[in-house]
Image (cartoon, coloured by chain):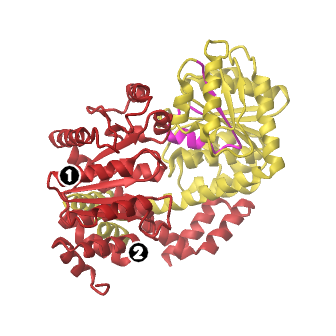
Chain colours: A red, B yellow
């Protein structure tokens, strides 16, 4: 199988070959020319998958909640693709604990495809590899793709915020509202989940969130609802999925879904152009050349603009 | 005077000609080749000015406080350069109200140079024009440069955070601690000022700030002190300046001042390289070409990687 080329893999993936899907995502993760080939092949075949981002602080119960959502979707007969993305661990090698646990439970279900993503050298890292992996799952015919990110760093928030609907999971009693605010989660949240809602402090967290939403100026015609869940028992998960569906309807009816997706692709195109240029500049100039020029700038033997020109001169050669 | 070339202007500026300083900053603001020439000329002559960034939400009293600091420095016999930077108002045309007020008061004092900065087309905007303007003031021999930014947007925070010491000004009773936290001010603050300290809520604001500082993991060996001021009466301003001086000593004694400055120059070099590449890519490809390719990507006739390649192909021609 390893010898199959991207064309064959894409054909197989769209015919339900899960091993081919996995292999395509590996290609995407590794970056380079074959990743671009995969992108070229899968992009025209996509556009039907609905993506749901799930993010929040560590320990909020995102993995359990994601697993519950998989259960809900499977109960309704939908196939589902899941990406677990951890930008903070570049060397997890494609599987972390929560994933392995779920893999065991879901391994026998051909309607579920779960995959961990790690930075493997893809130019632009996971921020660019993730939308490509989503496109692979989209082209493979999954009507729903869940993207779970692990932490609340800038990259995690950025990745989760690129979904059609972004779910932010918080827990009571942990000062989560303020941390979420600080991490920029308020800006990307379409739906808030107060998980572990059987614990004390639910009302306080909801009040804090409400106050922050009241202060937020950027809000449009959708105020992120707050849904209580207890992922371990499954309570509230059905309501969460209904809320996601309601958000989807809202986006579709107002034309915002197409707008969001067009904006995402535009941003992605800009990012790719910039990353390729950056790579080009530094590869032509070479790391040593950059260091040499930087040292000269710091020593005030050279100004930053002349240094930039020297670095860029290599490009035209 | 308008006909003097950058070489002559720099020579005049270093000999105390304030009109030449103003003209050099205008060149820097406008960007283009003569801005680069100015950069080349002033960078080797600098490195002695100590820069203090002053930022915080609108209405916190930053202008009044800056004016008080100017007074303190003048009282000690120091000359001082002041940049008032407002990235949110690209068309202020170089002077806003607070500035004009101060201009009147300080106009007769040759030891003070005050200048508003607005985006005039400098590539990379004020984030790149501000360090260049600082270099002009540095080369002109000002031992202190105060950089006041107007709001708390990402750009304002970035600009204020590029100083040797960054002062974040807040006021009691306005929920400022949380907003400051959200705006990323906690990360750039070296000194906090609770201004309008004659109003109620000072203790609460200090408690909130303290709690946030306790939670902040990124802190090194300097915990930002909180200084109370009443800028309108001048109370606390002497203590504020002593605190800034203490921070400077700390940076100098630990070697962090040189590190900070080297890091800032490295970041600036990277930014310049990227901005020039971006400009190059878009100017070669043309705005229409980008729009056409983006539309093709959104319509799924083309994938983002192929579109990026087409945009970049123009570069090699």
Q: Which mark is residue B147?
A: none
Query: In which chain is the residue bearing label 1?
Result: A
Q: How far apart are marks 1 and 2 (CA)?
A: 49 Å
- Residue bearing mark 2: B316
Q: What stretch is highlighted in magenta?
A: B149-172
Residue B221 rendering spot, x and y as whole percentages: 75, 45
Residue B136, percent from left and from top: 69, 46
Q: In which quarter of the image is residue B268?
A: bottom right
Q: Do the residues labelled 1 and 2 touch (CB within 8 Å)?
A: no
Q: Horizontally, is B123 left or right of B167 in the view? A: left
Q: Which of A137 and A267 is in front in this view?
A: A137
Q: Position of residue B112 (x, y in %)?
A: 74, 31
The chain under label 2 reads: B
Q: Which mark is residue A73?
A: 1
Identify which residue, B228 or B178, lies in the foreground: B178
Which residue: 75% across, 27% down? Answer: B240
- Give the tally of numbered discs: 2
- Taking the image as shown, residue A238 lies to the left or right of residue B235, namely left
Residue B143 visible to the viewer: no
Quadrant location of the C terminus of chain B in the rendered image: bottom left
Q: Pick whichever, A31 or A84, lies toward us.
A: A84
Up/down of B181 relative to B174, above or below: below
Residue B157 falls inside the magenta stretch = yes
Direction bottom: furthest residue: A3
Tell me if B220 is positioned left or right of B273 in this view.
right
Q: Which residue lies at the image location 50% right of the left edge and 34% below the top edge?
A: A175
Which residue is located at x 18 percent, y 77 percent?
A: A11
């Amino acid at each position: 199988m390893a010898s199959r080329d991207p064309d064959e893999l894409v054909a197989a993936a769209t015919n339900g070959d899960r091993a081919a899907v996995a292999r395509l995502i590996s290609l995407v993760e590794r970056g380079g020319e074959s990743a671009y080939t995969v992108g070229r092949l899968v992009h025209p075949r996509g556009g039907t998958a609905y993506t749901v981002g799930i993010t929040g602080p560590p320990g909020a119960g995102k993995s359990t909640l994601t697993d519950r959502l998989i259960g809900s979707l499977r109960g309704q007969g939908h196939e589902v693709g899941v990406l677990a993305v951890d930008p903070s661990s570049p060397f997890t090698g494609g599987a972390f604990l929560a994933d392995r646990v779920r893999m065991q439970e879901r391994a026998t279900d051909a309607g579920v495809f779960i995959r961990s993503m790690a930075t493997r050298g893809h130019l632009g890292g996971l921020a660019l590899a993730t939308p490509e992996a989503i496109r692979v799952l989209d082209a493979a015919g999954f009507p729903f793709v869940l993207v779970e990110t692990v932490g609340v760093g800038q990259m995690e928030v950025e990745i989760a915020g690129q979904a059609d609907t972004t779910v932010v999971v918080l827990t009571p009693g942990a000062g989560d509202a303020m941390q979420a605010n600080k991490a920029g989660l308020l800006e990307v949240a379409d739906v808030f989940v107060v998980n572990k809602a059987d614990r004390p402090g639910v009302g306080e967290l909801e009040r804090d969130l409400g106050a922050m939403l009241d202060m937020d100026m950027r809000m449009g015609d959708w105020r992120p609802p707050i849904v209580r869940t207890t992922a371990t028992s499954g309570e509230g998960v059905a309501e969460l999925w209904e809320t996601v569906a309601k958000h989807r309807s809202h986006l579709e009816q107002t034309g915002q879904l197409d707008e969001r997706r067009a904006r995402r692709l535009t941003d992605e195109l800009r990012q790719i152009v910039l990353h390729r240029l950056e790579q080009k500049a530094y590869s032509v100039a070479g790391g040593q050349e950059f260091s040499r020029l930087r040292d000269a700038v710091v020593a005030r033997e050279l100004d930053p603009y002349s240094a930039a020109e020297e670095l860029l001169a290599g490009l035209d050669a």
